[in-house]
Amino acid sequence: MDGLLGLYLVLIFIALIAFGVPIAISIGVSSIAILAMNMPFEVSVSTAGQKMVNGIDSFSLLAIPLFVLAGNIMNHGGIALRLVRFAYIFVGRIPGAVTHVNVVANMLFGAVSGSAVAAVAAVGKTLLPQAKQNGMDLSFFTAANIASGPTGQIIPPSNGMIVYSVVSGGTSIGALFLAGYIPGILMGLASMIVAAIYFKLHPEWAGKGFTVKFTFKEAMIVIFEAFPSLAMIIVVIGGIIGGLYTATEAACSAVVYAFILSCIYKQINLRVLKEIIKDTIEVSCLVLFLIGASTIMSYVLAYTQLPKIISESILGVTQSPVVILLIMNVILLIVGMFMDLTPALLIFTPIFLPIAVQIGMDPIHFGIMIMFNLCVGITTPPVGAALFVGCSISGQSIEKVTKKLVPFFIAIIIALGLVTFIPELSLTIPRMAGLID
């Protein structure tokens, strides 16, 4: 009977999504429907309400709206321009420099804002005039911007990792943050390799030989201007590693630091601040409502024993860790195409984490793997937020850009394979920092 209830849960959820019901509502309604099959309706609604409130009653989750606010302040605070100029120091002499700078700047912006969409928007807007001016292939430029944007979800700080920490039962946020550095950089390098190959094969699109060369004095000035923005990494990650404060307190520090920096850059006024606060409230409410609704579903999943049934089914097919991880990756890549990162994390972590632990996978390593998988979905149709934002900024059609994204997908999936099957890529830095054994 429990297995049948689990099937009903999945069918109701899929049916609601198919009819265009918002995903948070679909999660909540399908979960309450299953509860109502086993208890009076009033009790099922009361139980759902209690679970929802308890699900968001977490000090760790307070970091999410704070990091969202910090990211929004950075997005409007003139920080992207300074990071772009900083990136030119390292890759400004490479053919197709604007595209390579885009990738590096997305990685740097992600390291201070934690938002893929914000990185795609801020860096894309900053570099688009240069790409047009220098004869770049705008569809490929857009594809590179979109493909490298999700590095900001893997390179800390990352709201997704905070969500995973909560839903996985308290996995160390600090360890997750540190574990994301190498995989995030690997995703960015995969995009740069694709760009390098493309400009080697199509030198006519390399921006008419456009490169940027700095004298030593100019480079020092650019580094000096960018350092306050890059110091956000020290403020957030350094404080957590040093034990000075928790992730939530680090997020609060990030807000204060970003606001002061934006005021120094004279990019914040009352009108912009109102927009920032409004956007932060909207995004935070959406994310927290999703978490609350998913807490109800997690309770129902445990009640129906669906994770156990799925675990037994997969382990019944094969005992090979390699095959099991491949199955997980394929499922998560498909899920990421149709579901945003946060609800996918909330739904599939309780299902797949027990299987991963059973085959000997570290929860931190699994967290990076699932994050990497779902970040790919941010760039893919039909619901990839980064895809739509990137195309709207450059004015390129989704169909044209999607074709140019295919080589990036191939390279990033290869990087995903490395992250999946080489645990040390995720675990080395947390282990060196003494956060894991």
Image: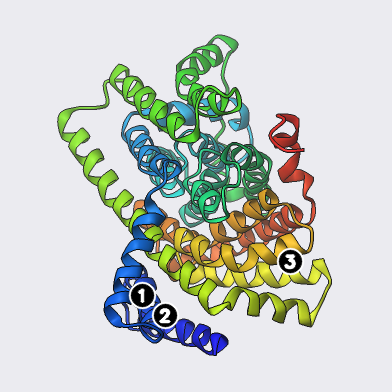
Q: Residue at x 62, y 44 (%)?
A: 184
Q: Amino acid at mark 2?
A: Phe
Q: Residues within 10 Å of mark 3 (few under 14, many from 20)?
A: many
Q: Amino acid at mark 3?
A: Leu
Residue annotated with mark 3: 325
Residues tagged 1 and 2 counted as in contact (Cβ below 8 A): yes
Q: Residue at x 37, y 34 (%)?
A: 70
Q: Amino acid at mark 1?
A: Ser
The mark nearer the N terminus, 1 or 2, is 2
Judge whether residue 106 can be spotted in this image: yes
Q: Nearer the viewer, mark 2 or mark 3?
A: 2
Residue at far right of view: 320
Residue annotated with mark 1: 26
Q: Horizontal and vertical percent for residue 65?
A: 35, 42
Tell whether 337 sits left or right of 333.
Answer: left
Q: Quadrant of the N terminus?
A: bottom right
Q: Residues within 10 Å of mark 1 (few under 14, many from 20)?
A: many
